[in-house]
Image (tube, rainbow, N blue to C red):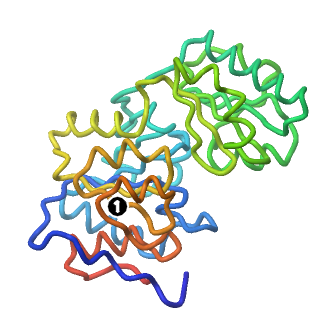
């Protein structure tokens, strides 16, 4: 953590906030740059539960990974996984938006061709039950494990019995400059989202964190005015649009900062928990900066 934490937003509405749902991205938002959970998270979640405020992680990570990370407090939580293609609460699927097998096969073949052309890239075929990869080298698998705790190495990533939610591509170079342009032909029919410096996700055009959040709001009878969200990257844009209490992290992509209503301190300054404490707990934080 930095020794001089950034100040909290000063242009927040005054008066008590009727917030019933808090949704946060993980990497670059809730987690610091070392991928660590923020100090005080469990105490904050306990206080939110006491106040009947639902906390929901929204991530490109798979459901199994999120459920493991929040195992101690998962009861009653809602998880928006795989960049919004899979919404689960208490082990029950609330929504999903799987790709067709033909598109999955075409994407895998495209990645194979990129590898043959010398691009250091690998595909992660993200199913509901597991992720599937063809690459077996340790550097690639080391990038897969933190996000896909349930993954299998297969000979052919187009042949298995599972619903595929998205195909994620990890590029050891620049995903925006190398991998995303190679997927141009998919952009007219699907979403090709640069979700990090090295990651690109391909999903159905109807799938994103915002669509998933709106579905969760309808399911729970919660309005955008009662929803607080935190995000930092381009795959958070639609989610930011679905909440009136929308926060871009200080470290966020410029497009996210432009779209959000407010700016929270950075992920390395414990911005999510500090903002929650400021808005809901009258500054009585369970966190340290």
Q: Name the residue at 61% across, 14% down.
A: 103
Q: Residues within 10 Å of mark 1 (few under 14, many from 20)?
A: many
The answer to whether residue 236 is left or right of residue 19 is: right
Image quadrant where residue 193 sits: top right
Which residue in the protein does label 1 denote? 247
Q: Name the residue at 37% across, 71% down.
A: 273
Position of residue 179 measured from the top left corner of the image (x, y, whole percent): 72, 36
- Nearest the viewer among 100 and 171 is 171
Task: Return the residue found at the far bottom.
Answer: 3
Task: Return the residue found at the far top.
Answer: 102
- Nearest the viewer among 228 and 176 is 176
Q: Is residue 277 above or below residue 63?
A: below
The answer to whether residue 122 is left or right of residue 45 is: right
Position of residue 83 measured from the top left corner of the image (x, y, whole percent): 48, 39
- Nearest the viewer among 4 and 37 is 4
Image quadrant where residue 276 sits: bottom left
Image quadrant where residue 272 sits: bottom left
């Amino acid at each position: 953590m930095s020794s001089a934490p950034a100040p909290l937003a000063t242009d927040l509405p005054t008066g008590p906030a009727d917030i019933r749902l808090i949704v946060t991205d993980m990497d670059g938002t809730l987690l610091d740059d070392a991928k660590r959970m923020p100090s005080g998270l469990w105490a904050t979640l306990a206080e939110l539960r006491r106040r009947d405020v639902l906390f929901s992680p929204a991530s490109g990570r798979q459901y199994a990974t999120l459920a493991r990370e929040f195992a101690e407090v998962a009861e009653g939580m809602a998880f928006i996984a795989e960049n919004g293609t899979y919404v689960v609460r208490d082990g029950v699927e609330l929504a999903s938006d799987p790709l067709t097998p033909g598109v999955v096969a075409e994407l895998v073949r495209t990645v194979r061709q990129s590898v043959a052309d010398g691009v250091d890239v690998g595909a992660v075929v993200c199913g509901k039950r597991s992720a599937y990869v063809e690459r077996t080298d340790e550097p690639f698998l080391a990038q897969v494990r933190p996000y896909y705790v349930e993954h299998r190495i297969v000979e052919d990533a187009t042949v298995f019995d599972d619903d595929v939610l998205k195909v994620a591509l990890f590029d050891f170079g620049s995903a925006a400059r190398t991998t995303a342009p190679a997927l141009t032909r998919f952009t007219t029919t699907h979403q090709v989202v640069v979700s990090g410096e090295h990651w690109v996700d391909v999903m159905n055009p109807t799938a994103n964190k915002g669509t998933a959040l709106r579905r969760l709001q309808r399911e729970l009878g919660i309005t955008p005015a009662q929803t607080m969200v935190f995000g930092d990257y381009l795959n958070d844009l639609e989610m930011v649009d679905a909440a009136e209490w929308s926060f871009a992290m200080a470290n966020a992509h410029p497009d996210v900062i432009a779209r959000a209503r407010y700016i929270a301190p950075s992920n390395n300054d414990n911005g999510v928990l500090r903002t929650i404490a400021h808005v809901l707990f009258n500054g009585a934080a369970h966190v340290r900066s």
